[in-house]
Amino acid sequence: MKFTKLLASAVMVVSLAACEDVFEDGSLQPDGSKPALTIRNPTKNQVLTKSSGLRVKLTASDKDKVKELQVRVRSVNGDADYFNFTTLPDTKILEFDTLLNATELPKGDYTLSINATDFRTNVSSAEVLFSVK
């Protein structure tokens, strides 16, 4: 009987130890594990035409799920955003692929900035420079 209780207790401890959140404080504070972020398009120093549009293709992943993805396009010499939007994917792996209308972008150099936030409030950022001719 003692052996059965001891065995049941051991199984319970092992089960609880496998669940991270039981031993954490339960907060959603950053845990040091930032989302992985890769911009595949546009590529560094890519030259686009207005008629081709701006294809934004990226991958974001995180063990705690990607909670928020922010996409911004800004002129290198300016303050205003030409595009600025946020999506709430709620997934561990996000394959993001969209085509933005570039007809309103004046000729010049631009920065595509991406911010990915996970459910533990860790943030990753990536940027790529491109040009519109």
Image: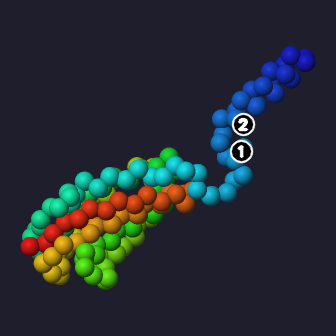
Q: Position of residue 91 (x, y in %)?
A: 45, 53
Q: Position of residue 131 (x, y in %)?
A: 15, 69
Above or below, comparing residue 19 to residue 110 in the picture: above
Q: CA distance from mark 1 to mark 2?
A: 7 Å
Q: Position of residue 126 (x, y in %)?
A: 35, 59
Identify the residue at image location x=27%, y=82%.
78
Identify the residue at image location x=12%, y=65%.
47
Relative horizontal placement of residue 13, taking residue 114 as reference (left or right): right
Identify the residue at image location x=15%, y=61%.
46
Front residue of 2/96: it is 96
Q: Which corner quadrant holds the N terminus?
A: top right
Q: Which mark is residue 16?
A: 2
Quickly name the residue at label 1.
22
Q: Earlier in the sequence, mark 1 or mark 2?
A: 2
Asked whether disc 1 touches disc 2, contact meaning CB atoms under 8 Å apart, the reply is yes
Relative horizontal placement of residue 128, taking residue 61 as reference (left or right): left
Q: Quadrant of residue 98?
A: bottom left
Which kind of residue does numbered mark 2 sit on?
A: Leu
